[in-house]
Image: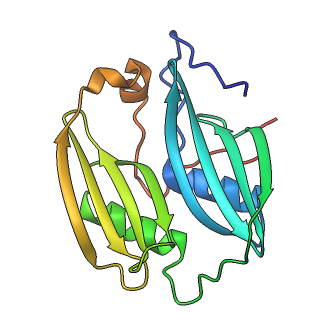
Amino acid sequence: LVLAKLEKSMDNETPFLTMDAALKRVELELPDTQITQIALEEDDQFLFFKAEAIKDQTEYTIYLHNTTGNVIKKDEKSLKKAVNLTGYLSFQEAMNKAMQLRPDCYLVDLDLDYDEKIPYYEAKLIDKQQAYQYKLNAKTGDIIEQETDSIDWQDYPMSFWNNGPSNVPNQTVNMNPS
């Protein structure tokens, strides 16, 4: 897997994608699927979004550049049976509920676990000192469980904090980079 390298001398004009912008990009790349995960991941100072989606008996995985939204890689695999998410909150609804819990934080991971007795979305939000994790009932959005841990803000490259991932809903991101 070739990942987009985060330049040490990034200019302050290059914004990180918000989770909302990453969601829109995934919806463009994987139309008519049900998104089950989007996470900002790091591998040796490389930041990227990893998203998973399902349709019928196929699970798709897509990797996006963390600032441009360009597709780095797409994979698909067959599932043993079709997954039915009827009656669950949409990914967008779950994302909105998670961000309302901590509007001053950045949502870095939202994952649907639909194999459990009570299906839930697991959300992770961070600021420079804390990681807030919530399990939200996938049908109602109610909080099932919550946890707070301290984080070492240095686990993320300085440009992550300097270029300000933002949960501002109207952030403009070029979804069709040239």
Question: Seen from this angle, which residue lies furthest top?
Answer: 9
State left or right for residue 140 relative to residue 143: right
Residue 46 image point, x, y percent: 56, 23
Nearer the observer, 172 or 157 = 157
User: In which image quadrant can residue 78 be found?
Assistant: bottom right
167 is higher (above) or lower (below) than 96: above
User: Residue visible at 25% across and 73% down?
Assistant: 144
Question: Seen from this angle, which residue lies furthest front?
Answer: 80
User: Residue visible at 64% across and 83% down?
Assistant: 84
**If the image is split into quadrants, where does the N terminus sit?**
top right
State left or right for residue 173 relative to residue 147: right
Nearer the observer, 107 or 33 = 33
1 is higher (above) or lower (below) than 145: above
Residue 171 seen by the camera: no
Question: Seen from this angle, which residue lies furthest bottom?
Answer: 87
State left or right for residue 113 relative to residue 75: left
Residue 98 image point, x, y percent: 35, 64
User: Residue visible at 67% across and 62% down?
Assistant: 53
User: Residue visible at 34% across and 61% down?
Assistant: 99
Residue 85 image point, x, y percent: 59, 82
Residue 75 seen by the camera: yes
User: In which image quadrant can residue 126 be found?
Assistant: top left
Residue 161 image point, x, y percent: 36, 28
**If the image is split into quadrants, where does the C terminus sit?**
top right
